[in-house]
Amino acid sequence: MSAAEPVITCRNVWKLFGAGADRYLEMARGKSFDQIREDGYITAVRDVTLEVRRGELLVIMGLSGSGKSTLVRCMSRLNDITGGEIIVDGQNIMTLSERELIELRRRKMGMVFQSFGLLPHRTVLDNVAFPLEMRGQSSHDRRERAMEVIKLVGLQGREDYFPRELSGGQQQRVGIARSLAIEPDIWFLDEPFSALDPLIRREMQDEFLRLREMLGKTIVFITHDFDEALRLADRIAIMKDGAVEQCDTPDKIVLNPATDYVAKFTEKVEKSRVVHARGLCRPLNGHAVEGPSVSGDLTVLQLARQLVNEPREFLPVADTQGQIIGVMRRQDALDILLGPA
C-alpha cells in the first residue's frame, strides 16, 4: 500500500512491571530481557518505535508472552506506559485526563478481544447496541445503528437470539458488530478468532477481509498465527521479549527476514503463495516497458503459467489503478516458484 499519514505513533515505548518501574527504567535501557528479569522486573514492551498508518491493517504477532497484547493495550492506554510516548491522531494520550481518554475510546476506538464478552441476559440486538447506550444515544437511534451492523456481519434474522443460542463463530460476529456500532476510526482486535475451530476461523477471516474492504478502517490485529498474519496484513510487526524484531510487508518478511528469530517463522512458508509481483518490483531505471503488465496484487503462484511461457526478461507491474509502478525480473519470480537454478 502507498505511504499514508500515521494515525498511531509509538516512540521508544517501554512497559515494565515491578515495584518502582519508573525509577528503574533508566537502568533498564541497554540491558537484555533476561538481565531485567534478574533485577526483578518484567519487560512487557521494550523500546518499541513504530507507526500505524491511516487505513492500514497492521498485524502484531509473536508467541505467548512476547508483549503483543500489552503493546496494543498501551496504544489505547488501557495500560499506562513506563517510558516513551504514544501519539493518536496528533494527541499524546499520556497527557489526556481520564474523561478525555474515555471520550477518545468512545468516539474513535473499537475493540474486539479473544473472549467474546457478550452479556448473556441480553439479545444480539441489545449486545450490539450496548456501547451506544453507554454513549447516551436514544433508543431509536441505537436500534437503527445496531440493525445496520448486524446486517453487515451477516446476522440479520438473529437479532432476538441470546448468546447461548449462537455458535462460536456467530458469537464472535456479535462482538465484531458491537465494536463497529460506534463507527470507530481505529479498530483493535486481540486474537479474535483463536478460540474458533479451523473451518469457522477461515470463514471469519474471509468475513473480516470483506468488512475491511468495505469499511476502510485503520486496524491493529493481534495473532500468534503466522499464516493468519500473512493472509490479513498490509504489514506485520513480529515481537519477541517485548521488542519488535521486524516490521515490514509480508513479502519482505518472507524474502528478507531481519533476524534468525523471524527466519524461524518463515522457513516453512511456501513463498510462491505469499510473495506478490509488487514484492519483487524494482524501479524502471531505463527498462523498456513493453507488452501487457501483470497486477502487483497477484502472487507468484497465480502467475506461474504466465511466467513459464513468458519470453520477456522484465515484466511491467501495475497497481490497482493500472499505473505501472516498476518491473519484475522474470527469473526472480521463477526462483521463488521453482527454487534457484
Image: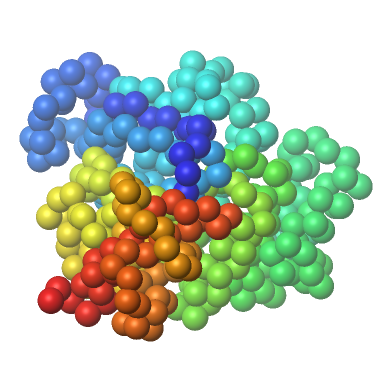
Instruction: State the colouring used for the structure image.
Output: rainbow
Residue lying at 66% horizontally and 52% vertically, measured from the top left: 215
Q: Residue furthest right?
A: 140
Q: Is residue 136 above or below residue 129?
A: above
Q: Is residue 337 left or right of residue 138?
A: left
Residue 280 seen anywhere in this rendered image of the structure: yes
Is residue 64 something that shows in the picture?
no
Identify the residue at horizontal 65%, vertical 28% (top origin).
Answer: 103
The one nearer the camera, 241 or 214, is 214
Residue 153 appears in which quarter of the rendering? bottom right
The C terminus sits in image quarter: bottom left
What is the total number of numbered labels drawn onto the structure image? 0
Foreground of the two, 136 or 55: 55
In this view, 265 is above or below 306: above
When the figure is inspected, residue 29 is found, relative to residue 171, above or below; the finding is: above
Q: Viewed as shown, does residue 138 lie left or right of 303?
A: right
State which quadrant residue 289 falls in.
bottom left
Q: Position of residue 10 (x, y in %)?
A: 38, 30
**10 to the left or right of 64:** right
- Residue at 87% of width from left, 45% of height from top? 141
Q: Position of residue 23 (x, y in %)?
A: 22, 16
Residue at the image position 81 percent from the left and 50 percent from the top: 145
**Residue 174 location in percent, x, y?**
66, 61
| Residue 334 picture location, percent across and down | 25, 74
**As rendered, which of 338 and 44 lies closer to the eye?**
338
